[in-house]
Amino acid sequence: MKKVKEQNGSCSIFRVDSEYLRKIAEFVVKTNYSHHTGSVYPENINEEIDAVYQEEKKYASTSQMFIAENSEGQMIGCIRVAKWDLVNELPIQRIFNIDPLERINNIEPISSIWHVGRFAVDSHAGISTISLFKQLMVYAITPICKEVDSYMVAECDSKLLRVMEVLGIETIRLGDSIHYLGSETIPVYATRQGLLNFFHKYWTMGLCE
């Protein structure tokens, strides 16, 4: 399934189903390395791609996946949001050994936890990466903003986290950073309230400006 959400002459955003998981996994891993190592891939890159793919299959039933394509139909961006079923292990648990339910519930009431991940944008696509991030992120956090006492958890590249803060996404660190998929990665969470300012500001923005 590939359903168009927005489009113009330069790019289009689609919601896609699990048929795109392998393609998304390859795009995410290779794009991350391209950003941080200049497209110098490790020898085990195919293993890393398969690991991402296998992990995403676990979340497919509760996921919403969005991709951006240029006018030639090439993928130039993606993002995924998944409502945690409290059963499948989240990346933040596996990578950082952090239980977000325990950490957040000690501070605030929880109705649902959503994991946002697999964000990647091709910086050579000829389109503003910040604008594309805004649009993809708006789609990712929409279901979170529709629920009361809902939370986003994510593992963010340190550079992306700084961009998120500048754009008005209020995040709270859950632990120390580690080196993951070619970059410094930080575990964070955000309350629904911490997402709303960004959501309302950019919901009506033009695509790929």
Image (tube, grey):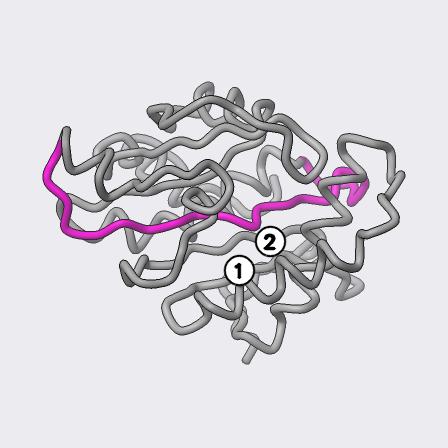
Percent coordinates x, y for residue 116 in the rendering: 43, 48
**Mark 1 or 2, nearer chain start:** 1
**Whether label 1 touches label 2, CB < 8 Å:** yes
User: Eyeballing the image, is 120 above or below 13?
Assistant: above
104 lies left or right of 208: left
Q: Residues within 10 Å of mark 1 (few under 14, many from 20)?
A: many
Queried whether the magenta region covers residue 40, the answer comes back as no
Percent coordinates x, y for residue 118 in the rendering: 56, 50
Marks 1 and 2, how far apart at CA: 6 Å
User: Eyeballing the image, is 24 above or below 112?
Assistant: below
Front residue (pair 57, 4): 57
In which image quadrant can residue 40 be found?
top right
User: Eyeballing the image, is 203 above or below 130?
Assistant: below
Residue type at numbered disc 1 = Phe
Front residue (pair 78, 12): 78
Question: Which segment did they paint magenta?
Answer: 108-128
What is the number of the mark on residue 66? 1
Residue type at numbered disc 2 = Cys
Instruction: Residue at 80%, 52% (x, y): give it.
Output: 45
Percent coordinates x, y for residue 74 in the rendering: 77, 61
User: Eyeballing the image, is 170 above or below 83?
Assistant: above
Instruction: Residue at 52%, 70% (x, y): give it.
Output: 57
Front residue (pair 43, 199): 43
Q: Secondary structure at mark 2?
A: strand
55 lies left or right of 123: left
Queried whether the magenta region covers residue 116, the answer comes back as yes
Percent coordinates x, y for residue 52 in the rendering: 62, 58
Instruction: Residue at 33%, 42% (x, y): give it.
Output: 152
Identify residue for label 2: 78
What is the number of the mark on residue 38? none
204 lies left or right of 36: left
Q: Residues within 10 Å of mark 2 (few under 14, many from 20)?
A: many
